[in-house]
Each structure stands twice: as structure tokens, then as C-alpha cells.
Image (tube, helix red, strand yellow):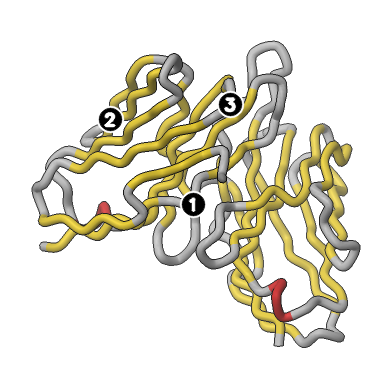
């Protein structure tokens, strides 16, 4: 069992829909990252969280440390949001990131 | 543009070839990483360099050999690879702050490697 579990693995939605991607982890962490990977392969860091909530444009990330759970929300989704979204955690006292397998999001016009 | 540049973007090599992947960061970071991404699997950390010193080698076969000549450049030297080594190889950098935790990681575009 992976230390970082994401759900769903695949998600297809219509343009404009509100999107939620979930991430659960099993270790104590110092930070959680949400990353976006486009088909070409490059990865962009969206958020780094250690508590609470962050918002950037149409993207919102929340984390519940007690429940070891984080969500990434996309409001007013657009086809250009189509990508793989990856959750990664950094355990306490460890510089390594442990990654989930990603959620493939497809937004249909 | 993330500030981390990888070359080449695509590489096809035979099992007897020797090639190198290059990563360059212009962010002033002190930590650089090599990751491997195989189909349907999470990213796997291969090597970590902090302040040009290798601090982690995640049981990577010796046919992969990293080199960090300075804090801005990282290489991955490849020789006698196997077809199962075909994958996307990603470089990343971050600023390690021992008392305050690392900053977020910035990734390159990756090198898509095919071993034939």
C-alpha cells in the first residue's frame, strides 16, 4: 500500500464543473504538495501546504492534519485544466517527497 | 518556465550506449534531485544532492551515475541500460532550510528516455 493514496485515479467532467481531487497519507508530515503534470511531462508546483487552506485563482487546496487528508478543488473548470494532478508529502525529518500515483483529469468543452 | 531546464527532452539509446542527461537551475537553490517516472507508477526518487554533496541514493543500479559539479548543474550519466529503464526522468530543485523545512520543489520538463 502506497503511503500516499489519491482518488479518483481518473476523472472526466464537463467544462464549468467544480472538481475535487483527494489525497490521503499515512505518515506525519511537515508539508504536502500539489503538483500538475501536463502531457508533455513537465511538472508545475501548484501548492505547498502545512495547515489550513490556500487559494490561487480558481484553485483551492485544503489540508486536515489530524485526518491526514488533503483536497484540491478547481472551480469553473476549463479544458486547459486537463492534466495529471499529483499529491506528494514530505515526512518529518526527511527531505524526500513521497508521491501519489496521480489523478488524470479531463475537462470536456 | 519553472527555472529548471533539462536536456535533451527526448533520448533513444541502445543498451550498449553511453549518454548523459543534463539539468540546470537558475533559482539559486541548494538541493537538486533526480526522479524516475515509469508508466502507472508514482515518481521514484533516485538521487539527492545538497550543497553539491550526494545525500541520498535510493538503491539505484550503478548503470545510473549522478554528477553535481556545482550547485546549478546536475547530470545523470547512463551506460549499459536495460529496456525497463525506459521512463521519464525528471530533475527538480529546492532550497533546503534545515530549521524551517524545504521550500517547494521546482521541476524540469523531463527527459523521455527510450532504451532499445
Which percent across, then down, holds residue A39?
41, 65
Q: Secondary structure at mark 3?
A: loop
Rendered image quadrant of residue A60: top left
Q: Please report the residue visible at 54 percent of the width from the left and 67 percent of the height from the top.
A: B39
Which residue has dot 3 on it?
A: A27
Circles 1 and 3 on the same chain = yes
Q: Please report the residue visible at 38 percent of the width from the left and 29 percent of the height from the top.
A: A70
Closer to the observer: label 1 or label 2?
1
Q: Secondary structure at mark 2?
A: strand
Tell which of B44 and B1 is nearer to you: B44
In this rendering, the count of numbered labels is 3
Rendered image quadrant of residue A54: top left
Which mark, by number, is residue A60? Answer: 2
Figure quadrant of the C terminus of chain A: bottom left
Q: Please report the residue visible at 83 percent of the width from the left and 46 percent of the height from the top.
A: B57
Horizontal side of residue A65 vs A29, given as left or right: left
Closer to the observer: label 3 or label 2?
3
Figure quadrant of the N terminus of chain A: top right
Horizontal side of residue A39 vs B108, given as left or right: left
Horizontal side of residue A81 vs B96, given as left or right: left
Which residue has dot 1 on it?
A: A101
Amino acid at each position: 500500500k502506497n503511503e500516499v493514496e489519491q482518488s479518483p485515479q481518473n476523472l472526466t467532467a464537463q467544462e464549468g464543473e467544480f472538481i475535487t481531487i483527494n489525497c490521503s497519507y499515512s505518515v506525519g508530515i511537515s508539508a504536502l504538495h500539489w503538483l500538475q503534470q501536463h502531457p508533455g511531462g513537465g511538472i508545475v508546483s501548484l501548492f505547498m501546504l502545512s495547515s489550513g487552506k490556500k487559494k490561487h485563482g480558481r484553485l483551492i487546496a485544503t489540508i486536515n492534519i489530524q485526518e491526514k487528508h488533503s483536497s484540491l478543488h478547481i472551480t469553473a473548470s476549463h479544458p486547459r485544466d486537463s492534466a495529471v494532478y499529483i499529491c506528494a508529502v514530505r515526512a518529518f525529518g526527511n527531505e524526500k517527497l513521497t508521491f501519489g500515483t496521480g489523478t488524470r483529469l479531463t475537462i470536456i468543452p | 518556465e519553472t527555472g529548471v531546464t533539462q536536456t535533451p527532452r527526448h533520448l533513444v539509446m541502445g543498451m550498449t550506449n553511453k549518454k548523459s542527461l543534463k539539468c540546470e537551475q537558475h533559482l539559486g537553490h541548494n538541493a537538486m534531485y533526480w526522479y524516475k517516472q515509469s508508466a502507472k507508477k508514482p515518481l521514484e526518487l533516485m538521487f539527492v544532492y545538497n550543497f553539491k554533496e550526494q545525500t541520498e541514493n535510493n538503491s539505484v543500479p550503478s548503470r545510473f551515475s549522478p554528477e553535481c559539479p556545482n550547485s546549478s548543474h546536475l547530470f545523470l550519466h547512463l551506460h549499459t541500460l536495460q529496456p525497463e529503464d525506459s521512463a521519464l526522468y525528471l530533475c527538480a530543485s529546492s532550497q533546503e532550510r534545515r530549521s524551517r523545512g524545504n521550500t517547494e520543489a521546482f521541476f524540469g520538463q523531463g527527459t523521455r528516455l527510450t532504451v532499445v
